[in-house]
Image: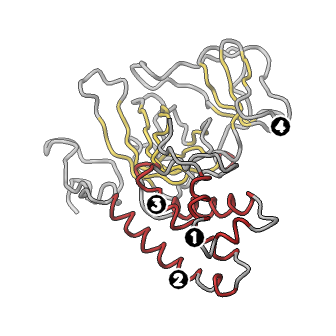
Amino acid sequence: MGNSTRTLQKTVDYAATIGELNPIISAAGFTTTIAIEVANDVMSKMIAQRFNWKWNRIKVSPFYTISWQQDYPQYPLANLGWLEHAYGIDINNTALPKPIFPIECVRDLEATSSVYSAPTKICFLPNNQLNLATQWAGPLVKYTNPLGATVNPNNPPTAFIDVNGNYLILTAYGTTGLVTPFATTNAAPGTQVSDGTCQWTVVDPFGSGFRIDPLPSQTGTVYQINVIAQAKAPSFANLQQKLDPIPDDFASYFNDGFIALLHRHSSNPAVRAKEPQKQMDWLKAMAEARGQADREKDNAGFIPDRSIMSEPSAIPVGPAWPFGPYGVG
């Protein structure tokens, strides 16, 4: 069940009750195309607002660090807009609660060969911009599931590009077969390829994946990486589609935007001339919407992640750790 119970048709019907807009909607030759395109513009502008709407938040399926692997293509993950925050879990640690640490979300990361600590930074990139292995690991190679392992298994890369240019990610651990696995040319994302007891899945080259920094060590701790993100704005395909992810208590702001942008399609110059002011009115409404959702204070504080007698941190100085090697700025 989605956030909304309202359809786009209700918004169109509401706009039709406004006298100066009714001629636009009821005019001969008016099609649903105009309504859908205006609605898509409104949705895009609302989601593009630089505010982390809770109703547009998504929890990405967690992934696990692999020895010496920096890049992790994902499937399915085609609706990622931007990253809010991330955290890692020492998932195989038997202590309760399991150790959890923050990971800084950044715009971009360079490829690295540095191995010195737990992951401290993460960014997302299109899968076709990640560094994948260019060949299969080979026959009868064992892939060990890192979940539950006492140390990070020395696994080969879990993503590679096959002979037909498909991006394959490992989705079932096991032992590879005797023949190089591959999918047909331009295989659809989600296509599964068997490889001995292993299984590979084709991912969308233009979908999203993650890059972390620094590299996981060859035989170290396995970390579960958890990402909280904002989704891309969805597109409308018909008037019966719900306003998801916009909840009902924010529908009035969507209506304001729809009415404002609809003015540009009027054949009456006097009505078209009102659009700039309507846009300003909508922006004011959007400011109110952000204020409505921003009534809780932010979490701000300093929480040490180790005792004062512990070894110096190997985490580089930055926004995620603005201290020197001994916890001093």
Residue for badge 2? 277
Distance of label 4 from label 1 (alpha carbons): 49 Å
Of mark 1 and mark 2, the one earlier in the sequence is 1
Give the structural element (helix, strand or loop) at label 1. loop
User: Dot 1, how many residues are within 10 Å of its Cα: few (below 14), some (14-19), or many (20+)?
Assistant: few
Residue for badge 3? 252
Where does residue 227 sit, x and y in percent of width and height?
A: 44, 42
Of mark 4 and mark 2, the one earlier in the sequence is 4
Give the structural element (helix, strand or loop) at label 2. helix
Say what amino acid the circle numbered 1 marks: Ile
Q: Is residue 145 left or right of residue 151?
A: right
Where does residue 220 sit, x and y in percent of width and height?
A: 41, 30
Q: Residue at x 82, y 65 (%)?
A: 29
Residue 45 in the image: above or below residue 276:
above
Of mark 3 and mark 1, the one earlier in the sequence is 1
Q: Which residue is at the front of the view, 218 or 16?
A: 16
Say what amino acid the circle numbered 2 marks: Gln
Give the structural element (helix, strand or loop) at label 4. loop
Say what amino acid the circle numbered 4 marks: Asn
Mark identifier at residue 18: 1
Residue for badge 4? 186
